[in-house]
Amino acid sequence: MVDAEQLDSHSWRLTDGGFEEDANAYCFYAREHYKKGDQVLLCYGTYTNLELLEHYGFLLQENPNDKVFIPLEPALYSSTSWSKESLYIHHNGKPSFALLAALRLWATPQSRRRSVGHLVYSGSRVSTDNEIFIMKWLSKTCDAVLRNLPTSLEEDTFLLNAMDNSQDFSTFMEITKLVSSRDETCTFLETHNMKDTHSFTDVILSRKARRSMDRWKLAVQWRLKYKKVIFDCITYCNKILDSLLK
């Protein structure tokens, strides 16, 4: 931590923190003098879990800033003025305001878009048929994303539970043989020269292997949350459809 007395030499900085190669450390620069024992509050900003993982090496169990992007029709981008960055699914599975608006406008015949624009940009539904169409499309698209991933939500949940609850490495190995993620396990073994899968009873992971195991667990946690958001979006769409089709 660099205090205010040292800050002048760093006045050119555009941020309050960053990795310093000279110090080989991530440094924060305070704008006032702190004494030993003072409480210091740090704000990581409105980062998604992927950004937190990339920049800081952790993620949050409940991150209100998390978001998921799904593939959209090319024509959708040309039918709206919303930026691509605003077209996403919230952490709770609900489509963003901009994504809903863009879908409603895209699903409207081009000849009618000008007349319904005020409804779309105020957040209102264009019509029941329009809403049914976009909810079905959104649900189908999310389902296709999940189906095209190498592992399922259930398999990742199983794998993460194995990582959390296995009391030793041999138990973990036996559990992971039951799921498709066993290919990941084989890669882990090969990377750390642990190809002999018949003698794990007394295996003590090296420091490097333990770090790799921790990173692997973080990756599984992230992709599980990613899939959970998409799954929750399908649930949200089906709930809306049930209310509209009654």
Image (cartoon, helix red, strand yellow):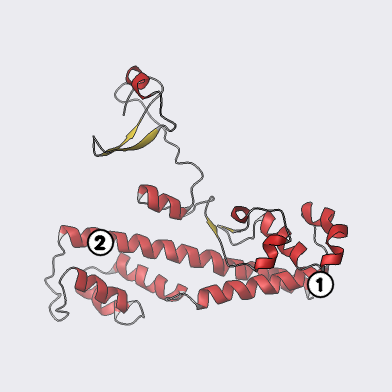
Residue at x 36%, y 68% (from the top left corner): 160
Marks 2 and 1 in Cβ contact (< 8 Å): no
For the residue pair 195 and 233, the one nearer the viewer reads as: 195
Give coordinates of residue 72: x percent, y percent. 62, 67
User: Which residue is the site of mark 2?
Assistant: 212
Q: Position of residue 202 (x, y in %)?
A: 11, 71
Rendering quarter of residue 213: bottom left
Q: Position of residue 200 (x, y in %)?
A: 15, 75
Q: Number of marks in the image?
A: 2
Q: Is residue 81 above or below residue 132?
A: above
Residue 244, compared with residue 121, is above or below; it is: below
Q: Residue at x 64, y 73 (%)?
A: 139
Task: Please tell me which of labels 2 and 1 falls first in the chain.
Answer: 1
Q: Quadrant of the C terminus?
A: bottom right
Indicate whether 23 appears above or below 67: above
Mark 1 = which residue?
129
Q: Tell me the distance, in whole angstroms, between the alpha carbons under discs 2 and 1.
A: 50 Å
Residue 210's tag is none
Q: Residues within 10 Å of mark 2 (few under 14, many from 20)?
A: some
Callout 2: helix, strand or loop? helix
Give the residue displayed 55% in from the left and 67% down from the top: 230
In this view, the residue in front, 135 or 38, is: 135
Q: Secondary structure at mark 1?
A: helix
Q: Is residue 189 left or right of residue 31?
A: left
Q: Is residue 235 found left or right of 66 in the rendered image?
A: right
**Image quarter of residue 178:** bottom left
Residue type, mark 2 in image: Ser
Amino acid type at image mark 1: Asp
Disc 1 crowd, CA 10 A, few/some/many (<14, 14-19, 20+): few
Query: Image height check: is 69 above or below 21?
Result: below
